[in-house]
Image (spheres, grey):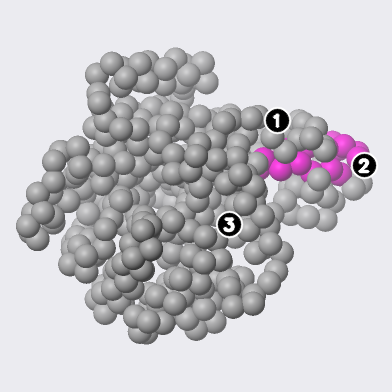
Amino acid sequence: MKPRVSPRFAARAVAALCLSAAAGASHAAGVYAPYIDMTLAPTPLIDQIGVRQGIQQFHLAFVIAGDGCTPSWGGIQAIGNGASGDLLTTIAASITRYRARGGEVSVSFGGAAGTPLMKACTTVPALKAAYQTVIDTYQLTHVDFDIEGSVQKDTEAVARNFQAIAQLQSDFAAKGRALHVTLTLPVLPSGLVQDGINTLNAAIANKVALDTVNVMTMDYGPADIDMGAAAISAAQGLYAQLDTAYKAVGQVKTDAQLWRLVGVTPMIGMNDVQSETFTLPNALTVLGAAYGNGYGMVSNWSVGRDQACPDNGAVVSPTCSGIVQRPYAFASIFRQLHGHWGTGVLRDPSYGNATGGSAPAWSATAVYRIGQCVTYQDAKYCARWWTQGDVPNAGGVWAKS
C-alpha cells in the first residue's frame, strides 16, 4: 500500500523545509515550471490556473510537426503563417493575461507522440524558421526541447536541432537578449542512458547555452520502486554526467553551477508503468532535495493531472492523478520553489470569478439539474439539463461558463 499524507501534514512539512533551506543554504531559488497539455479539451486557461494556484511559470506542451515542416499544437492546430482557430485564440489570450499578472511561459517542442519538427524539417534554415515562427507568435524568451524515443538515435536530426537553436540564441544575443533553453530527456534512477548522453553532448558540441537539463523521472520499469528516492538518484547521476560532459570540452563548473543545470520532472500520481506511483510524500522528498542541492528546476507531468479522478478512481489519465488528493496538492508543494521567469505572480484564489462566482467541485455521483454549476479542471460549467455522471469537459450537457 502506498503511503498517504494529509494536507495539514504536507503544509507543516513544506514550512519546515523552507525554514531549513533559508537557514542552511545560500542557493538562489529554483523554479517550479510544470507542464500543461495545451491540446486537452477544453483548452486549459493558464492565467486562471497560474494566478489561482500561485504558479509562476508553465511549460506549454507540445509543439510538433503538422503538415510537413509546419509547427502545430499536437498535430491538431497549425501555428503562424496566417493560421487561425479557437485553440490559437484561447492560448494567445491566456498567455497575455497571465503575463499581465507576472507569469511567464516556455513552449515545449517534441514529446513522446507525433513527429518532432527536428525530424520533419530537413534543413537547418527550415527548422530554425519553424522555431522562429512559434517564438514570434508567443513572444517567447524560454523554450524547451523534449527529445525522447527513436529520434534520439537520429544523429542528423539531433545535430540539425542544436545548430538551429544555437543560431537562434546568437540572433537573440545580437539584439541584447537571451533565449533560455531547457533540454528534457528520459532517465533511469542511475542517470541518463547512452542516447541521452549523446544528445547532451551534441547540444554542448553545437554551443547551445543550456539553462537546465531536465530529466523525466518516471516510467522506469521496475516494480515497487521508491519514486522520490529514484528521482533524487537520477538527479545525482545527471549531476555527475553534466560534470563529465562539460569537462570534456574544457568547461569546469562549480558544484552550484552544475546543480543549477539539473531539473527533474516526475509524473505525479500513477505512472504509465502502473506499479509506479509518485505520491505526495515523494513530492516533499524531492522538494527537500531541490532546496538542499539547489536544483535549477522542478516540474511535473502535468498540471491537468493534479487532482483526484472521479470517485477517487485509481486509473492512469491525462486529467487526473489516480490517487487520493486535493486539487493542486502537488503544485502547493512544488510552488515553494519561488523562482520566477516573469515579474512574479501574486496568488489570487478568486481570480477569474468576477462574472460567475465559485461553484462546488463536480461529482460523478451527484445529480445536477438545469442551471446548476460545478468546477472541473479549474473551469466552471453549468448544466443544460438534468445530468448524472456526465464529465463536464465532454461537452453536450455541460456549458462552460
Q: Position of residue 218 (x, y in %)?
A: 36, 47
In-image side of 119 versus 153 (left or right): right
Q: Nearer the viewer, residue 133 or 45?
A: 133
Is 366 magenta? The answer is yes
Q: Does residue 284 sit above or below 274 in this rendering?
A: above
User: Comparing marks 1 and 3, which lies closer to the viewer?
Assistant: 1
Give me the disc on residue 38.
3
Q: Secondary structure at mark 2?
A: loop
Quadrant containing the C terminus is top right
Q: Residues within 10 Å of mark 3 (few under 14, many from 20)?
A: many
Q: Which residue is mark 2?
A: 370
Q: Residue at x 38, y 57 (%)?
A: 177
Q: Residues within 10 Å of mark 1 (few under 14, many from 20)?
A: few
Query: Which span of residues is magenta-colored?
Result: 363-383
Quadrant containing the N terminus is top left
Give me the disc on residue 350.
1
Q: Secondary structure at mark 1?
A: loop
Please name the amino acid that badge 2 sits on: Ile
N-term-proximal mark, 1 vs 2? 1
Mark pair 1, 3: CA separation = 23 Å
Residue 260 seen in this snapshot = yes
N-term-proximal mark, 1 vs 3? 3
Q: Residue at x 25, y 50 (%)?
A: 188
Q: Position of residue 365 (x, y in %)?
A: 76, 36
Q: Residue at x 57, y 31 (%)?
A: 346
Q: Secondary structure at mark 3?
A: loop
